[in-house]
Amino acid sequence: MRILAFILSVPTVLGSAVALAQPGLPSAPMGVEVTRTYGIEFSTIGAPGNVARPPVLPTFPNRDFEMPVGNVPYTFRMARTEVTTGQWMEFTNTFAVNPNFPTVLFDQVSFVRLPPLRFAVVGDSTYTGPGYQLRLNPNIPNAENVPVYGLSWRDAAMYCNWLHNGKQSTIESLFSGAYDTSTFGAVPQLGYTDQSRRSPDARFWIPDENEWSKAMFFDPGRAGNSVESYWQYPTRSDNPPLFGPPGQGQANTGFMTPDLSAYSIPVGSYPADQPPWGILDGAGSTAEWIEWQDPSGASVPYFTRRGLVGSYADAGPGPALFHSLLGSASSFGPDLRLPMAGVRIASAVPCPSGLLVLVVSATIFSRRRR
């Protein structure tokens, strides 16, 4: 029993061995492997080496992938939801208590000093310092699971670094791990210089266009490893989703709310039409940053802008339909905080070998003591 207690008290390779489930989420479809790290629910995306999907949209400059997408030669994990208020509040509060936290990071106001544009929190009036603290907005039901709107790609990259480094409270935990922030910058007429793809040993990262497309649209149970195995929409359908509030529609997009209440709809509020991998809100909630770099940059002074995929809350029916379709993408500078932008985290599959070593080592140690 002592050996078992020792093993369970040691952090796993990717997070805490006693991480809690992400609250309030509907169950994934039967057969989907769901794991939890740092309280985030991840679906395991298998079928490595699946076929790619050729472009399915007309070619609009910087509006879609003009290349095949969806082929991923390895197994990985994808968060079932976009980053939520509860998750981002923990991130912010880790550094907000430090009054010396920089007011500017990478030529922009830091995520601590300028929170995301829509974030279901309020200041914690009971906290007396140092720095400050946030708490969930008591006037928003299920505020913990409301998605975070208004993140830049660089905000998301630093969040991945923080997870990679075990949620440490040192500012250095933001600077490397998944992405080297010393590369963040731009050269006029040449482009943004941000690291193009996560580091090879990254534990958490911003998904690329193939990982995101596979998790949302590929269904090996539909037509095997073939082009026909891709659905056109992330609601496991070739028909456009019905837009509307929970209980009336299939996605939090395509309907206007004068009071902006669509931005307070929690993740997982549309459980009936999950993709085969158990991913929630593939259509609606936030648009999502991906690693893909737009090589052209249109008429802007900087090239290599980052991809933003998926439809988003409070969009009109036309944009909602377009951005829900397989192959659609827009591109923006990684330093921009856009009102519709959030992120969904990808991750490596936890390796049990670390725990196996602990079991063997603990057993040997116990025998030697005897």
Image (cartoon, helix red, strand yellow):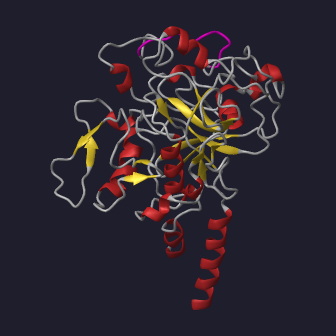
What residue is rendered at 64% in x and 18% in y? 325
Above or below residue 238? Residue 112 is: below
**Horizontal arrangement in the rendering, residue 360 relative to residue 146 (left or right):** right
What residue is rendered at 28% in x and 60% in y? 99
Q: In the rendered image, is residue 246 in sight?
A: yes
**Horizontal arrangement in the rendering, residue 111 relative to residue 213 (left or right):** left
Above or below residue 12? Residue 293 is: above
What residue is rendered at 68% in x and 25% in y? 217
Above or below residue 317? Residue 354 is: below
Majority SS type along the magenta span: loop
Q: Nearer the viewer, residue 5 or 237?
A: 237
**Horizontal arrangement in the rendering, residue 38 relative to residue 67 (left or right):** left
State yes or no: residue 237 in magenta: yes
Coordinates of residue 141 in the picture (x, y in percent):
29, 29
On the image, which quarter does residue 273 sit in?
A: top right
**Horizontal arrangement in the rendering, residue 314 relative to residue 219 (left or right):** left
- Specify the segment rendered in magenta: 236-245
Quadrant occupied by the C terminus = bottom right
Q: Nearer the viewer, residue 9 or 170?
A: 170
